[in-house]
Image: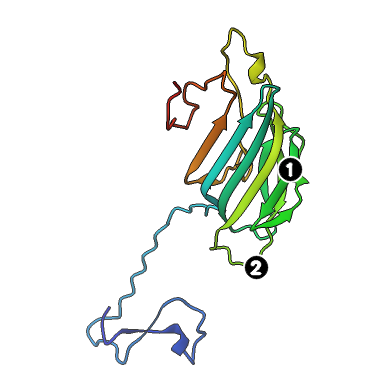
Amino acid sequence: EGGDIEPVDVRELDMLPNGGTLAYRYFEQPADAALIVTLTRTRNAIHEVIATLVRRALVEVVNGKDGTAIYRVQMRVKTTERQRLLVDLPSQLELIGVSVNGREVKLEVAAEPDEKIHLQAHYVPVARTTSADEEFPLNFDFRWKVTPNIGQSHFLRGSMELPLPVLGGYDTQAAVQELRVAVWVPREYALIGEPEGFTAERQPR
């Protein structure tokens, strides 16, 4: 404040280093008062950037009486990862195929299976030529043994646990905007209730 102070672009500095943030110049100093410089500092909270976002995901599971469940998982993913992406899949699965952006890829085991949550960590290669701002399709197809299976229920009723793939790992899960799950069971059975975090679109007859 004071005098004929005006801000200038730091790139215009030629007698001083132009590596600063702000720069001012003045042509004369007031005779009755000195120039006043006031500095204000604020601290902003740091928020971690979401590395992986699942915009839409569809999981289809077909259950047989023998306990074999066939999974088909389709995701629309946006991630800043350029080499590989961590994903937790049901442990002891029989892999049918994995594709990234329509290209078949191979999974790499990242850790031993966690029997408490029936999941095992894998790495899926996501190297691509597109930018990180562009989403791409990520698909998984596999078979998995349901334990206990639907044919082993007592008194024609019981619970069935179907672990879903988790991008980013179980501890640091990716943000999911929309997730839909379709489950088929034999005609003799009906799925009742709503799993935690889901809302049934239709009720069984």
What is the number of the mark on residue 79?
A: none
Q: Residues within 10 Å of mark 2 (few under 14, many from 20)?
A: few
Residue at figure coordinates x 76%, y 51% from the top left: 106
Q: Residue 48 placed where, x, y %?
A: 52, 52
Q: Is residue 92 visible?
A: yes
Q: In this view, does 32 lie above or below 79?
A: below
Residue found at the far left of this picture: 32
Label 1, secondary structure: give it: strand
Label 2 belongs to which residue?
Answer: 129
Q: In this view, does 29 lie above or below 20?
A: below
Sequence-first disc among 1 and 2: 1
Residue at figure coordinates x 42%, y 32% from the top left: 201
Label 1 belongs to which residue?
Answer: 96
Q: Is residue 163 visible?
A: no
Residue at figure coordinates x 50%, y 41% from the top left: 179
Distance (Cα) linking label 1 and label 2? 26 Å
Q: Residue 173 placed where, x, y %?
A: 58, 42
On screen, residue 23 versus residue 123, left or right, reads: left
Residue type highlighted by circle 1: Ile
Q: Nearer the viewer, mark 1 or mark 2?
A: 1
Residue type highlighted by circle 2: Thr
Q: Which of 111 and 199 is in front in this view?
A: 199
Quarter the N terminus occupies: bottom left
Q: Residue 43 placed where, x, y %?
A: 42, 57
Residue at figure coordinates x 56%, y 22% from the top left: 187
